[in-house]
Image (cartoon, helix red, strand yellow):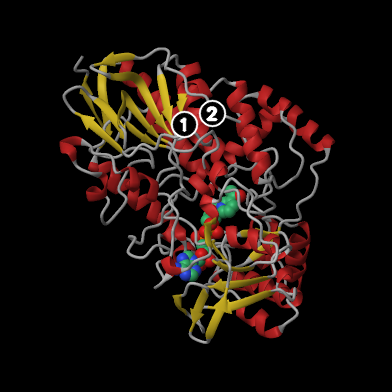
Amino acid sequence: MSPETTQPSSASVAGDTPTYDAIVIGAGFGGLYALHHLRDEMGLSVRSFDGASDVGGTWWYNRYPGARVDAPSSPFYAYTFSQELVDEWEWPETQSTQADVLAYIEFVADRLDLRKDIQFDTFVTDARYDEATQHWTITSTDGELARARFLVCAIGALFVANKPDYPGIDDFAGAIHHTGRWPHEPVSFEGKRVGVIGTGSSGVQTIPEIAKTAEHVTVFQRTPQYALPARNRPLPKEDLEQYRRDWDELRTSMRKRGGWPFRIEKHDPTDHTAAERWERFEEMWDRGGMHLAINSFNGVYVNEDLNEEISEFVRTKIRSIVEDPDTADKLMPSYPFGTKRLILDNGYFEAYNRDNVTLVDLRDDPIESFTETGVRTAEGEHPIDILVLATGFDAVSGSMLRLNPKGRGGVPLADKWSERFDNNLGMTIAGYPNLFMIHGPGSPGVFFTMPLGAELQTKWIESCIRHLDDAGLGAMEATEEAEATWGEEINAIANRTLYPRANSWYMGANVPGKPRQFLGHLIGSQYFNRLTEVAEGGFDGFEFENRVS
Ligand code: N01
């Protein structure tokens, strides 16, 4: 599909720079909803920009073989605001593929006529706030793009690729593909020796797919992972019809239950013997998806003993699937279950039973360097033709730091965030008036269903804009005191759980030198109630400025 770039319809011009009420950066789930809502529901002039050639955001970039939503998704990993969209889209499987999610996003863009207000192939490299005019100006490498009163950064929680800098990696003569920047033309693994570094969600999804055609796959694993069987299956038509009929109610449940509509079956572990608990683990494993984590027993993420029991249960499962005991040993995870992103697998552990898949445990046999033709580890050479980097992202804060907006006094965000990602409500930053983040640090982001989270955050942006306009005000920004309190709240919630025990990207631990700070709000329902309370209570924790013009 070729992207459309039209001239904006309702902008004014200051000097040579088109000026809007709002600029949205990003045309993924978050940015598209923000464009629709601010433009169509609020009547604002809005211009969107995206570095990609079409809509989709994460789903435009992450097109590696095997890419799927890492949750049982259909039809809930989608927009919830429109019954028409729910009625018109057919989801074929319970765990949607990347291609299906992207097709859905393209359908929504068509249906809401969004592309006419998006400038594609335009990577925004800078954003500056002008205190005198209370406007943001954004630029690309080609020069000034636009100005607006409000800047919405929907630039992706998982966007900035994390690339390892092993000695000699640039000397490797074969193709290198990062899962988060996968080529749009097909990549053939037929007859190729493939090295895969990384065994997070992306690696676990792609390794079994690549192994189907490659001559050989060598997996370089730094940390073994818990992965649960996805049990993906066709979504029965009658289930989809039922969801459509119950949509209003389901949507309300999603809002209250962490983004998914299903009631959690609350079992107290102390009401059961160890044998009964094990039996229930088996039942949840057979059901597949996230059931083991969310429906087995209360307290999986806080109760160390229960967590160790589930951890051992999954280790037992891995041992029962992987035939070679030495390989199985290397695959044994040791951190608390669920404290790195839980992974849904479609044949990952089984892939190690193939003759053409080898596992290198980097804890015992670290990578020393790359050569033109392969990887040299402590124990020897691994010749490869193609290198796949499934090494993740500088998550959540990375894309804001790459944009590095300049706020009051021209202060770059990178200065403010050099040691902590201070912000208020995961959406606003002291010193950066009228700038809003979707899925920023300290918001539920990946811990909630992201399309619904973006809808609810955008509704809050609406209440901010209405508050300003109703009172004749020009700008609002978080106070530093509110940021400090918010940071303490986020940490307090995380510290009540086992999450901080793992070296995860949730903690910023995957990127060398990144401040160690829990990056999300773990209780989505509480978070969104809080947004409503702040708006209805007159925006405690914010400062306001009169409008200058
Ligand atoms: O990235 P990851 P991902 N040398 O950071 C390893 C979402 N997602 O792309 O664990 C060697 O999880 C790293 O090792 P370690 C999902 O939320 C969504 O897989 O840090 N190895 C790890 O094994 C997910 O959580 C969908 O020790 C290195 C791997 O690379 C998030 O994206 C689909 C290394 C990175 O795992 C990120 O997943 C897929 C190095 N220098 C993903 N650096 C959906 O469908 C890193 N690693 C929505």
Three-letter amino acid code of the residue under disc 2: Pro
Residue 120, label in figure: 1
Which residue is at a point 77% across and 57% down the rendered structure image? 287
Residue 3, label in figure: 2
Which residue is at a point 32% across and 39% down the rendered structure image? 125
Residue 502 visible somewhere in the drawing? no
Mark 2 close to ligand 1, CB under 8 Å: no
For mark 2, give the secondary structure: loop
Which residue is at a point 66% across and 57% down the rendered structure image? 188
Mark 1 close to ligand 1, CB under 8 Å: no
Three-letter amino acid code of the residue under disc 1: Phe
- Relative to 304, does residue 288 appear above or below in the rendering? above
For mark 1, give the secondary structure: loop
Q: Earlier in the sequence, mark 2 or mark 1?
A: 2
- Classify 10 Å Cα crowding around label 1: few (below 14), some (14-19), many (20 and above): many
Residue 139 visible somewhere in the drawing? yes
Q: Quadrant of the N terminus?
A: top right
